[in-house]
Structure formats: structure tokens, C-alpha cells
Image: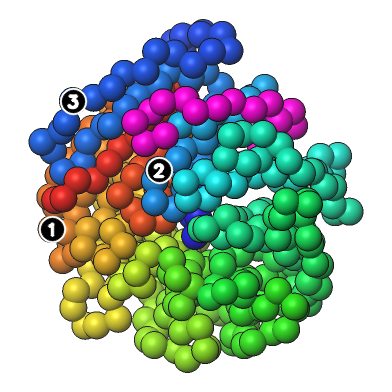
Amino acid sequence: MNVRWPYALLPAAGLALALWGGRAGAQTPMPTPAEPLATVWRHRLPDLYEIAISPNGDRMLSLDGDGLIRAFDEAGKVLWTHQAPGADRIAVSRGGSLSIAYAANHYLQRQVHFLNARGRRFATFELDTPIRSAIISPDGRYVAIAAGRSIVFCVPTTEGIRRRIIPLEGEVTQLHFGPGDALYVASRSADGVRLVKSTGRVLWEYGPPGTTGYSICASEDGKLVAVAGHRPSGAIEVSLFGADGSRKWTVTRPGRGARIRLSAAGAAVLLSYEHQSEHALQQQFERRLAYFSGQVEPSWTKGGAYTAPLFVSVDRAGDWVVGLDTQQQVSVPRFRLYGKHGERRWIHTSPAPVLIALSSAQGRHIAVYHANEVLELLKVHQP
């Protein structure tokens, strides 16, 4: 599972950004850190539009405004480059065995480019409708592309790409790989969540009447899926399901704008959302971050009048969480490392406002692009 969770966090207005041309700036390797959350390497790169990271953090891709893709290993070495004009989205599997590049929601750019481990394009095909999103299975065996009310299920081979179109009732909004060749699909205009085989067979579906705005995330093995949906009452319903459709547990929270993340082993669910509160007789929405394990304890919530946390990363077993505090009163954002009971273990201060932050599916590697044009790899060491 390659989870992509970017945030346009803080504006870069007022910063004097250096102009560096088209090449990557010199790599800045970091000494072995003593801190539990610390920088591994930094590169100065202008005009990055997108980044992607493999499920275990051993590969990172960057994409700039000219369509140049760079592949980095865990030490920050540039392994290859590839030009993909018009692309604005990228994804990569474990070990970099497969990468893809495409343009999202673009009527004129409907091609998907398939790249091998050396960054060479071995296949390209064009869809009939604009692409909403595309994902790669962790092992690189499959690719699923959401386009309108269908999914294009792809199997890369030495002869090219075998593909099958899976029609659906609703418009696909989110995809995650389930067990084997199955896919968890969230949709709208026929709001619900479904587990669908590559043959198109629907194994089960969930969608209470009136619930909308689904957010989903699957465990690394696909045997569990976390689901958040907005109820008509204004509450967010959070549930954990097994691959057989059985519901493990459910909790509700008042709020809106739900985004959900399930740890790689399925032990913890993180919910990023906005909570409605009253201050001085005025109603306002505050950013919150909630942790659930399916038990009465541990569970906790961060955020309020003094902190505005965004979810960044979670340990595969749920033993720690990284959030990014984006409170406007703070001059630069801070990455906060929390334990499974919500205790604060470490603060890592960002050198500049953060434009994009996302983590590997296993949680330990965090890719960050700053407003000073620096791409950084953070790593959570044993806290």
C-alpha cells in the first residue's frame, strides 16, 4: 500500500526562494542521529510539484514542474531520472520495481506511463476519460486506475500491460489494494465502500443511507480496512472492517472533513478532521487528530485552540504517531512524535514552512518538501 497524504500547509509568500535551475542541489547527508525523529538527508530542488515514497521507505520519487522525475534511495542517492511531460502524479512500489506517472483530472492528458526499476518507460496507454487517481500494489504486481465510474485493473508483463475495465455504479473517489487482486473502492453518487475483485465481482459493500464523503485506508496485507463516513447528523462514523466484510468496531465523532489512516499492521486508526467548537459565543472549526485502537484504551485526541495537528505518519503496530502542528501563531511548523497513549516524545522543528508531507505505508520514513525548496527525508528511529 502506497499511501499518498500531501498537505498544502503554509503559504510561501514573503520568502525569498533561491533559483537553482534544473539540477538537483548538493545532497546534505546527516550524521547518525540520537533523536528519535531526525533528518536522514536533504536535497535542494526547485519547483517540485509532487513526491511519492515506497511502502517501506526504500525509494522516493520527486516530480518537478517540467515533468522531470528523480528517484532516490534511502541514503539520498539519485538512482535515475525520467522526463514525463504533463504528468503531475507519481507512485512507486517496494524496491522501486515499478513506478507510474500520470496527470490527474486532466481532459487532455489521459496517459499512464509505466517505468521499470531503472526508470525506463516500458509501456504507455491512454484512457478514454480523465484519470482521478492510480495506485500500485506494494509488490508492484498490479496497478489500479480510477477514471470516472470505472477502474482499469492492470498487470504489467514482459509483453506489455494486460488490463481489464471494471465498471462501477458510482464515481470512484479512493482506491486501496485488498488481499490478492481485490480492491477496496470508495465512491460518490452511489456513496459507499466496496471490496471488488479484478474480475469485477463485488464481494461486499457498505453504505448506510445518507452517509457521504467516505475516506478509506487498508492495512498492508489488505485484510483490514478502516472507513470514515459523514452521517446526516453531522457526526463522523469510523469503523474497522475485515476483508470478509465483518465489522470489528465503530466509533463516532462530531466533525467534518474526515481523512483516515490505518497502520500497516492494522493495529491503530488515525482520524484527521475538523471539530466544531464554541469560543466567546462564536462557533468555529478546529483541526483535530484522533487515535483509536478498537479498545476503550488507548484512545486520544490532539488539537484545539492552541494546536492544529495534521496527520503525517503512524507506526505499523500503532506504537507511535507523527503529527504536524500548523498553528498560525508558530513561525515554523513542528513535527510532534507521540506515543500510543498520546504522550509527547519528541519535537522536530521544520527549517521552513512545509508544502508537502507524506509517509511510507509502514510509517517510519517521512518525505517533506519545504517552502525553501528543500526536499528532506525524515526517519523515526526507535523512540
Within the image, what quadrant is residue 38 found in? top left
Badge 3 amino acid: Pro
Which residue is rendered at x = 46% and y = 84% of the image? Answer: 242
Compute the Cα span from label 1 to label 2: 29 Å
- In this rendering, is residue 33 above or below 151? above
Tell me the magenta residue range: 73-92
Q: Secondary structure at mark 3?
A: loop
- Dot 1 or dot 2, earlier in sequence: 2
Badge 2 amino acid: Asp
Compute the Cα span from label 1 to label 3: 27 Å
Does residue 77 belong to the magenta stretch?
Answer: yes
Extreme right residue here?
128
Residue 110 horizontal/vertical position (percent): 81, 45
The circle on residue 343 is 1
Residue topped by disc 3? 31
Badge 1 amino acid: Glu
Residue 383 horizontal/vertical position (percent): 14, 51
Q: Observer-nearest residue: 274 or 251?
A: 251
Q: Observer-nearest residue: 265 or 356?
A: 265
Question: Of the residues tagged 1 and 3, which is closer to the observer?
Answer: 3
The reply to whether residue 117 is visible in this rendering is yes
Compute the Cα span from label 3 to label 2: 18 Å
- In this rendering, is residue 83 above or below 27? below
The reply to whether residue 7 is visible in this rendering is no
Residue topped by disc 2? 58
Residue 152 horizontal/vertical position (percent): 76, 62
- CA neighbours of label 3 inside 10 A, class few (<14), some (14 to 19), many (20+): few
- In this rendering, is residue 29 above or below 301? above
